Image: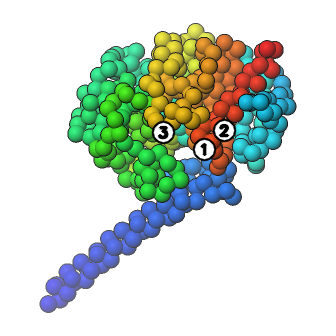
Amino acid sequence: MAPFKMTISRMVGALGIVSNLLLRLQWSHLQRLMRVNSLFSENRIVWNFSHMKEFFFHREMPVSAKQPLTFGQAGHPLPRSFAFRGETFDTAKWQRARTQTAIVVVHKGAIAYEAYYLGTSAEDQRISWSMAKSFLSAAFGIAHSEGLIPALDAPVTDYVPELAGTAYDGASIRNVLNMASGVRFNEDYLDFYSDINRMGRVLALGKSMDAFAMSLTERARGPGLRRQYVSIDTHVLGMVLRAASGRSVPDYLSDNILIPLGMEGDATYLTDGSGCAFVLGGLNMRTRDYARFGVLMAHGGRLGARQIIPAEWVRQSTRQSAPPPCAADADTDNGLLGYGYQWWLPPDAETGEFFAIGIYGQYIYVNSAQDVVIAINAGDRNFRDGNGRITLTNIAMFRAIVADLSGR
């Protein structure tokens, strides 16, 4: 009987160890979910947005250069006010209302204005949110030029056959680049049960983003008919890039853009539990490095003698090419914006005027003709007010800065 009792004792002990391990894992998941639930709290949002790797699985990206791309210094104050739709706004008051944490203005290779607010610093790694989509677009353009993804009108299922039978079956790569996949997806950040918030919980709990994308089976309309901003579209582009290149998105982006760019700080990508990058919004870096990327785009993808992003892709991706907006956006200020390949265009955009945007007030604004780039980070909890009105007012501020710098 003694050996039997010993066996039972060992089994019970092993079960105890396993149970304890499972409890610890579950507790870890619950802790992460509880922290994520307070991510946008008014009294924590500024700190949280500079410390995102404390909330999510992540991957460090050692991409800083020994000799970063340097900026000159050309101190120039911001305009004290700007106008939009007949109303004059005090610039400093508007910045405070938007809970801006950082602004870097680069004009002709020199920093014209730079400031950090609300206890943040130049060294903070700030979350990009959907500005990451525009970085992925640039990486996609390199893969396209290398022949890894030669035909933008090819179905996404050619590269990711696991998407057959999902809402993405029949959508082309170009459809998805244009945010015109037709997939039914609720992007309401204020609705706990929306698709975008379900996706956030997938990320927080360390589940698979690929599996989430493949679980979407309903369409709102056919591919290519209307533009509807659907963040999961960008994850599908990431799936295509991974399949075509045989590499992770952080590796491909680092080697082809971030390291050649000459960044002054390292970056971090948020990931799901399997290490797959949260390509639709998980990039974190310094505000000056967001500005460096904007300068690269303003110069047609060229840095000195090196063409990093194909010039033709820069032109194609930043011009209006998406179909008209869906009915929900058509009569709003959001409907006045143009869209290319994961880049936005202001109303009545000048040639070479475009921007990347992330929720809660993240921007990389580019005016190529005047060689001005404006990078902004913020924790604006009212960024959705007016269905695009806040965005258009910010664009008016950016244009006032450009006019002041260029003497127009």
Identify the image quadrant of the N terminus.
bottom left
Residue 380 in percent (x, y) is at 66, 46
Disc 1 designates what residue?
Answer: 384
Q: Quick one: label 3 or label 1, which is nearer the N terminus?
A: 3
- Contact flag, marks 1 and 2 (Cβ < 8 Å): yes
Which is nearer the eye, 87 or 72? 87
Residue at screen point 64% across, 26% down: 365
Give left or right: position of 402 versus 215. Answer: right
Q: SS class of the residue under badge 2?
A: helix
Q: Quick one: label 2 or label 3, which is nearer the N terminus?
A: 3
Residue 126 in percent (x, y) is at 62, 42
Residue 307 in percent (x, y) is at 52, 12
In the picture shown, does residue 353 fall above or below 229? above
Residue at screen point 38% across, 18% down: 144
Viewer can see residue 275: no
Quarter of the rendering containing residue 333: top right
Q: SS class of the residue under badge 3?
A: helix
Give left or right: position of 155 versus 138. Answer: left
